[in-house]
Image (spheres, grey):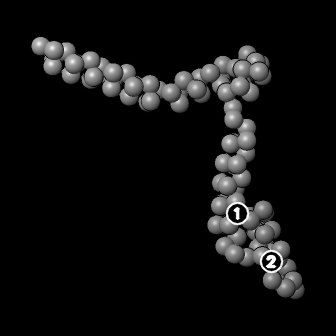
Amino acid sequence: MASAALKASVAAVAMVVGAYWYWSPFLAMHQLRTAAREGDTDSFNDRVNYPRLRESLKGQFSAMMAEKLDGATSVAAILRVRVPHWEPCSEWPS
């Protein structure tokens, strides 16, 4: 009997932890959205880790630019990334 009760309680705890792990991003986004809609900047700022967000965005942007530039350093290649439909004049060196 004690073994069955122990297994049931362990399973219940595992389910609660799993549910929290699954729903925590949704809960966090709900709290951020609510704070933004209500104009509660203090609550919003308490939930955002700005230094970590800045580093994450910097890394993602650097990876994206490196992929798009593919090692190119010329102004023409950089302008093609910034202005997708831009083509250099035929007399410009590449």
Label 2 sits on what residue type?
Answer: Ser
Image disc number at residue 74 = 2
- Residue drawn at x 70%, y 60% is 62
Judging by the rendered image, the residue that carries numbered circle 1 is 65
Residue nearest the viewer, comparing 61 with 9: 9
Q: In this view, does 1 lie to the left or right of 38?
A: left
Quadrant containing the C terminus in the rendered view: bottom right
Instruction: Name the residue rendered at 78%, 63% in the picture.
Output: 83
Q: Where is residue 76 in the image (x, y as percent from the top left)?
A: 81, 75
Find numbered disc 2 in the image and state the secondary structure of the residue it sits on. loop
Q: Which SS class for mark 1? A: helix
Numbered circle sitting on residue 36: none
Real-space CA distance between mark 1 and mark 2, rounded to the nearest whole angstrom: 14 Å
**Residue 73 versus residue 85 in the image, above or below:** below
Q: Up-down: is 64 above or below 54?
A: below
Within 10 Å of the Cα at label 1, are there few (<14), some (14-19), or many (20+) other Cα atoms? some
**Residue plotted at (78% across, 62% down):** 82
